[in-house]
Image (tube, rainbow, N blue to C red):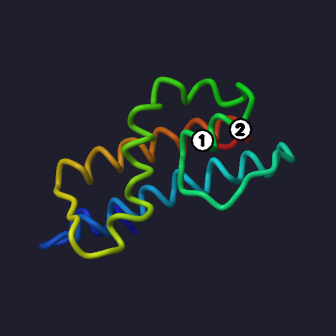
Amino acid sequence: MSQRQRQAADPIWDGICFHAQQCAEKYIKAFLEEQTIAFQKTHDLVGLVDLSSGLLAALNPLRFRLAQLSTFGITTRYPGVQADQLAADEALKTAEETRAVIRTKFGLP
């Protein structure tokens, strides 16, 4: 969805950022679920990574970017804050890198 929206004539940057955050969040939560690690309802990606007890150490270099991405789980859904192309590009990159790490953990291409 976000890649297609990114290529639209008039991209909705907020939507791209929100969907990128959701992608990363769902992958991290899927990993935690597979490890039977309990987690609360949250959009805090760094907090979720911290719950993995080091099993997601490959995401540690992304901690700052994951913290930034976490904000898009809420702020872009409400008026007043708008993302731009740079934020959307960074959000997509972080989501894609997170996805790749988790898929590798799952043994998926």
> Which residue bears the numbered disc 1?
47
The quadrant holding residue 99 is top right
The amino acid at mark 2 is Leu
Instruction: Please tell me the numbered disc located at residue 82.
Output: none
Against 13, is 52 above or below?
above
In front of the other: 59 or 43: 43
| Residue depicted at x 68% and y 43% | 108
Q: Position of residue 57 (x, y in %)?
A: 63, 24
Against 85, is 82 above or below?
below
Q: Is residue 75 left or right of residue 109?
A: left
Q: Position of residue 61 (x, y in %)?
A: 47, 23
Q: Mark 2 to mark 1: distance in Å?
A: 6 Å
In front of the other: 18 or 67: 67
The quadrant holding residue 8 is bottom left
Q: Is residue 81 left or right of residue 64?
A: left
| Residue depicted at x 25% and y 62% | 6
Q: Residues within 10 Å of mark 1 (few under 14, many from 20)?
A: some
| Residue depicted at x 32% and y 67% | 76
In front of the other: 57 or 8: 57
Tags 2 and 1 touching, CB below 8 Å: yes
Q: Quadrant of the C terminus?
A: top right
> Which residue bears the numbered disc 2?
51
Q: Position of residue 9 (x, y in %)?
A: 13, 72
